[in-house]
Structures are given as structure tokens and as C-alpha cells.
Image (cartoon, grey):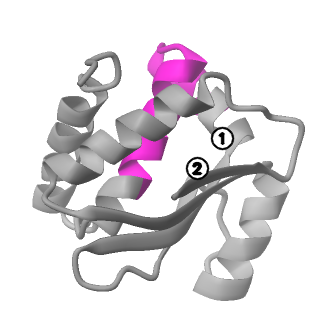
Amino acid sequence: MINFYSENSFELKEASNHENWIKRVIASEGKKTGEISFIFCDDDYLLDINQQYLDHDTFTDIISFDTSVGNILNGDIFISTQRVEENATEYNVTFSEELQRVIIHGILHLCGYKDKSQDEAQLMRQKEEEKMQMFHVEQ
């Protein structure tokens, strides 16, 4: 089950389309959908989580807490809509496109992909692009 929650005024449009897309992405990686929650929030909310749980004192667009068991993906994915908006402007893409990239970035983390090294980050970017192409593909 995929849940979408907001700790700010953001409301995800086309939530069912996003849910179906996320499930297709998970299946394309040979995984199963467990209990995944997306929590949309502002910068300060996510900064507090970053400081409290990860001991990082920086703003970020996403934090994933992976509680997957085997091939069943479970976790909480926190997304700062403020940071997504700023990144969209910086990278000259729409808010919706940047939000999709961040959503799927979190899912790819739950699938086991990392982005700490340059090689890992390059693979992550390739996977993000591949999975974003699946958004409008109906199955």
C-alpha cells in the first residue's frame, strides 16, 4: 500500500496515477510493494528530521527510512516540497517533473540503490530517467 500525507499545504495531484506508477517501478525492479508512506513537508520539518535522526545540519529534498524485508519494500519517504520547488527552478524543469524525480529517487533507495559514490550516483540518475519514462505508460 502506498500512502501520501502532507505536513504542509501541499496536495499531490493525480495521486492514483502516482501510486500506479510507483507500483510499476517497484515491479520493474523485481520487488513487491509493502507499506510505503510519502510525507510531504517543508524545509524546516525535514531539517529537524535530518538533525534528529541523521545528525546532519543541512537542508535536503528527501530522506528515506527503509524498513524493507527481503523483496517487499516498506519505508517512509519524507520530501520537502520547498526544496523540490527550488530545485525545479535551479534545474529549469517543472515542479511536477522534479517531484517525480524525487519520488522515484526515494523508491530507488528502497530498492537498494545508493548515491554516495560517483558511480553509484551516475547509476541512480540513469535509473531515475528510466523510471520517469514509465510515468505515462499504461499497463
* Residue 64 visible (yes or no): no
The answer to if 135 sits in the magenta stretch is no
**Residue flagged by tag 2: what amino acid is it?**
Asp
Please report the residue visible at 37 percent of the width from the left and 55 percent of the height from the top: 107
Residue 133 position in % (x across, y down): 24, 22
Which residue shows up at 28% across the image and 41% down it?
A: 24
Q: Position of residue 116 (x, y in %)?
A: 27, 68
Q: Are marks 1 and 2 in contact (CB under 8 Å)?
A: yes
Is 137 placed left or right of 100 in the picture?
Answer: left
- Structural distance between the alpha carbons of marks 1 and 2: 5 Å
The amino acid on which the numbered mark 1 sits, given as a three-letter code, is Arg
Q: Give, as a single range, the part of the protein colored magenta.
A: 86-106
Image location of residue 131, percent across then percent down = 24, 35
Compared with 130, 116 (above or below) is below
Q: Camera-side residue: 104 or 18?
A: 18
Residue that carries the numbered disc 1 in the rendered image? 83
Residue at point 24% right, 83% down?
70
Q: Is residue 75 left or right of residue 78?
A: left
Identify the mark at residue 100; answer none if there is no mark. none
- Quarter of the image with the C terminus is top left
Q: Secondary structure at mark 2?
A: loop
Q: Which residue is mark 2?
A: 61
